[in-house]
Amino acid sequence: MKKPNLSFWQIWNLSFGFLGVQIGYSLQNGNTSRILSALGADVHHLGYFWLAAPFAGLLVQPIVGLSSDKTWTKLGRRVPFILGGSIISALAMFFMPNAEFFSYLFMPLIFGAVMLLLMDTSFNITMQPFRALVGDMVNDDQRNLGYSLQSFLINAGAVLGSLLPIILTGIGIANVPAEGEKVAPTVIWSFYLGGGTLLATVLWTAFNTKEYPPQVYEQYNNVTKEEKSSTSFADLIKGIPQSMWRLAIVQFFSWFALFLMWVYTTSGIAENIWGIDPKDTASQAFNDAGNWTGVIFACYSLFAAAFSMMIPRFAKAFGRKGTYRGALIFGGISLLSMVFIQDKYLLIASMVGVGVSWAAILAMPYAILSASLPASKMGVYMGLFNATITIPQIAAGFLGGLILMALDGRAISMLGVAGVSMIIAGLSVYFVIDKKRKTDI
């Protein structure tokens, strides 16, 4: 039995909460290095602090996926996890930029790192069920639209989150720490607003989405008794489809690149464009560089949001693989260009390619993968697939400092490394298998 077509607004509601989640996630991406540097972290050690995020995802997402596959409540199977994760995320966002005020409990840097771990763990609890929810509810005819619309909402949220510090600066909130304090008020208030918005949008999805009850879901996906039976972790690993293994190669190089970009952009443009030592974290120039990182990250998210709505057309014309491959190579070339740019406004041009690649990364792997997964194990395999995101980030976290030292300590050179990695990811798409789900043909 084929799943029915959903209306545009039904598909919109499935992913609307991702708008708020991504506002929080982009605030984390754009400001974590800034906050940790202000709390005393050395630029060579920033990658180690960022390891909290991928380690959390590696452990949490498969557990959440497996649990949500076996859960059914009045709110559904995925929604309870989405809602619970968002509450914890928001609380961590309220506390992290205020780490210095909890010195009676921990050193500020330690408290900030703990909040980063808690925040990213709960982001992972929230994100994974959103991916599975679209796979559960949308048929193959609308699969590209479902994940493209999710990508659009993610990037719209990223634009808002990335711009919040500079918007608050524009309305008169101080962008440098008060005397005796460490974190700028613009960052603190951005995290307050981001956490509140996260809760509001997730509540919208929770109360405007009606998941298919177990019996209906099984009929739509032709779930057999054998598929419903319990499966050991070893059997799950053995059952991973070949398309997932091949996508893992692409994911490794693309997420290795993204991690380096998120960690080193603020320090890189501070030294390459503002001409300052990135260790001078209390200076006006460093905080201006931090704000500009938010601006260019907002730009790539804006370009990604626009391209997200074009992905179904590109995928129809060039295929999912062709669209995916071209987007990643374009993104890699754009990252490489940042090494040679010394005008902050020209960085916006580089963000076009970064945005196109980011949109493809958020949509195409899931559109390809979900068509090859057994419906009864959609959540757990989506959770396991998250390892293809977290493992490259862990590798980048451990290797980033060593690569930076090998490049004479110039953070901007790390964006060149990211560009090469992204190009390799694009070339690897050639080996990916793409097929349609049998129950949707």
Image (cartoon, rainbow, N blue to C red):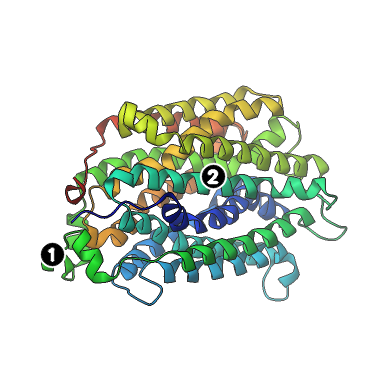
Answer with left or right where residue 91 lies relative to residue 181: left
Q: Quadrant of the N terminus?
A: bottom left
Q: Which residue is drawn at 40% across and 64% down?
A: 60
Rendered position, 231 above or below 285: below
User: Residue type at mark 2?
Assistant: Asn
Q: Which residue is drawn at 32% across and 26% down?
A: 318
Answer with left or right where residue 196 lies relative to residue 404: right
Residue 14 horizontal/vertical position (percent): 43, 57
User: Disc 2, disc 1: CB below 8 Å?
Assistant: no
Q: Nearer the viewer, residue 346 or 14?
A: 14
The quadrant holding residue 411 is: top right
User: Residue type at mark 1?
Assistant: Thr
Q: Which mark is drawn over residue 155?
A: 2
The quadrant holding residue 290 is: top right
Which structural element holds mark 2? helix
Residue pointed to by mark 1:
224
Q: Which of 351 and 416 is in front in this view?
A: 351
Residue 396 horizontal/vertical position (percent): 47, 44
Residue 325 horizontal/vertical position (percent): 36, 30
Q: Which residue is drawn at 22% across and 70% down?
A: 215
Which one is earlier in the sequence, the residue at label 2 or at label 1? 2
